[in-house]
Image: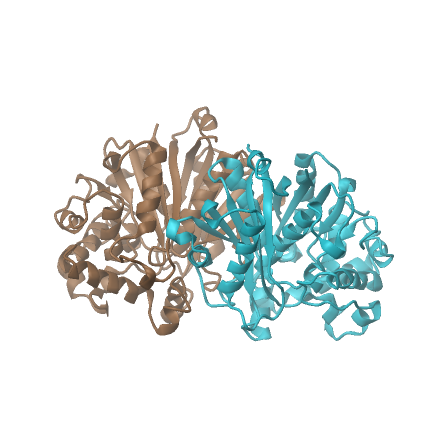
Chain colours: A brown, B cyan
Amino acid sequence: MREVAIVGTGVTKFGELWDKSFRSIGIEAGIKAIEDAGMSGSEVDGIFIGNMSSRFINQQHIDALIADYSGMATRNVPAVRTEAGGASGGVAFRQGVMAVASGMHEAVLVGGAEKMTDLDDASTASVMDSTADAEWEASMGLTLTSLYAMIARRLIYEGTATREEIASFAVNSHKHGALNPNAQYKSPITLDTVLRSGPVAEPLNVFDCAPYSDGAAAVVMVPLDVAKKMGVDYVKVAAACQASDTLALFQREDITTFKATTSAAKEAYRIAGIEAKDISVAEVHDDYTVGGIMALQDLGFFKKGEAGKAVLEGQAELGGKIAVNTSGGLKARGYPVGASGVAQIVEIADQLRNKADKRQVANAKYGLAQSVGGTGSAVTVSILEAI
Amino acid sequence: MREVAIVGTGVTKFGELWDKSFRSIGIEAGIKAIEDAGMSGSEVDGIFIGNMSSRFINQQHIDALIADYSGMATRNVPAVRTEAGGASGGVAFRQGVMAVASGMHEAVLVGGAEKMTDLDDASTASVMDSTADAEWEASMGLTLTSLYAMIARRLIYEGTATREEIASFAVNSHKHGALNPNAQYKSPITLDTVLRSGPVAEPLNVFDCAPYSDGAAAVVMVPLDVAKKMGVDYVKVAAACQASDTLALFQREDITTFKATTSAAKEAYRIAGIEAKDISVAEVHDDYTVGGIMALQDLGFFKKGEAGKAVLEGQAELGGKIAVNTSGGLKARGYPVGASGVAQIVEIADQLRNKADKRQVANAKYGLAQSVGGTGSAVTVSILEAI
């Protein structure tokens, strides 16, 4: 199996991009990544796109759309769209790694894109809720937020984290988002802001939830041997893993841990030949604050019952024990669903190439990205390594 | 790059399956494929699912759904959903090949599934139309059928095929469908039936168009070296290729040929080390009769201007120059979109393993499957080889 490297990254501003179309943001991110790699689009021989729902823009066949508007359809370059709820971008990244590792492709563009704000909020929420089990959850009135609220209640009930500790994850993300020029929200917030914001599904408030956003992100990958000769900054893909769990939450033995995260992480650490303590910087899926807290435990950065306290104490900030969501995470950078998993990879790759500007982590050797679909029904865990 | 083999196939009945859910047909096909391979589900370490639209059943995250209901989520087996309009299943197959070829997976289940008849026909049509360009075609009132009707008009205008020759493709598909116990339509039809059926978009009539269907198909793949030791019938995947074209039809130089087909086919023949004349049996994408005629030309089975005549003369029937759509094709077997590309692979694999019963082609060494998204915006061409 060939080793794979990331040689270029690109990301658009995240936010309510009323003046831009889906196709324009998708192309913007792709061009940035190709330029960053010092390549020409004509060198790319495969495209992989994470995109969650055709319902946001009433367009299936996003694969062909991107191949077309990137100009690559003139060379008939194949394009693949993957969907796995919130993990759509993470899955696309893994497929891109597989494509280069297999020898079937020499240079791939992996993109993630979503334009969610063209619909009214209720319609967008309805699409998001269909990442839960339509027959056994959504049809009963359960929303994705209410499912995560149940998880939060259980964590609090079991004493794994306090309400304040859970809320502190949003404070951490916003603190970093303020340093990211592409973030949707650039204002630091206090714990009080989260705790006093409007309730959505008790105990989660508005500020516990990531926003609906428009945005796109992309990376270019080539074989590691090729990257070494290109004369550009690159990072090695040390592991790209994925795992599944039941679609419905009620079928789990334990809802305070996502087995898909623990399983994918275990495999990723094994393949990369490292342990959780070797990770210096991580992007985790904080579509809800409680998801962020669980991720830090499930990935092995903190023991169960200690992650919330650690975040509240600032140990997940830049300069802390491990720098978490330096991009601002889903909460502050924004959450264009399909783009999210790829944007995480962009942030980690930029950190390991010392291109993260004001939010640069010092001397990081390994970084990790975790992307989650539904209530942990699909999770990708990728580890990048500075060379 | 590891060579890959298909060791098991499974397909459900196609049709209006009112008494079955999406999840039940998906699992039925998967279990059949695993049993056909003489394996246990516990040996599968990756799932790839072709599924076109979450709108048919209001369910995103089909990847997790299938992992869950197949029981594989208990082992956290990763699952990937691909979407490329009508080529969704063909793309899933190629991703499965890539997964085994890369060494990242040892035994994968590739499935395709769609349940289209739970919506009213107008809603289903609207989803299908969104595989065309939403901004430049669908929004202007163009439907997928009207786009193919324009192609048919142009073929007739240029003298590439007559109306009767185009219609004869449906006669060919129905003749074979009558031999397939899993086909949606098992009645042979005459040319007159097609020509006198109700008009949809001139010159195409109802019998020029494949139906909306429910159904699922699956194959199991392992490394070729492993297949040789399993003691089951297997076929080698000689090539799995894919190509793109513009999303909108008006942007093409020539609408009487699909460049994505010619491009993917050229690459597939090169990789397999064969020519078009070496193919004995083929499944091509006849969502519209005119698409089937074009496929026979674009794949190199007949020269441009000769495919229609050949089909009318019976050269695409069992016993003809090349046996085309022995399954009944999309027209007669049925067209559950995401299942279609995988069902084609099932038919070709069964033909090459001498398991096609009444529709068996004699002494076939190579078979080909072609799956199309939109108006040729994405095309997969796969070649299987009897061992």
Query: Farthest residue toward the top?
Result: A229
Q: Quick one: quadrant of the C terminus of chain B?
A: top right
Q: Decide if residue A277 is on the left or right side of residue B189.
A: left
Q: Residue at x 50, y 43 (%)?
A: B107
Q: Nearer the viewer, residue A265 or B260?
A: A265
Q: Quick one: quadrant of the N terminus of chain B?
A: top right
Residue B233 figure quarter: top right
Q: Residue at x 41, y 49 (%)?
A: A89
Residue A140 figure quarter: bottom left
Q: Decide if residue A44 is on the left or right side of residue A258.
A: right
Residue B341 figure quarter: bottom right
Q: Residue at x 38, y 32 (%)?
A: A236
Judge whether residue B255 can be spotted in this image: no
Q: Decide if residue A124 is on the left or right side of residue B285.
A: left
Q: Decide if residue B115 is on the left or right side of residue A263.
A: right
Judge whether residue B166 can be spotted in this image: yes
Horizontal and vertical percent position of residue A352: 31, 34
Horizontal and vertical percent position of residue A260: 34, 50
Horizontal and vertical percent position of residue A259: 31, 50
Horizontal and vertical percent position of residue B130: 56, 63
Q: Nearer the viewer, residue A205 or A144?
A: A144
Callout count: 0
Q: With respect to residue B170, does B354 lie above or below?
A: above
Q: Nearer the viewer, residue A300 or A38?
A: A300
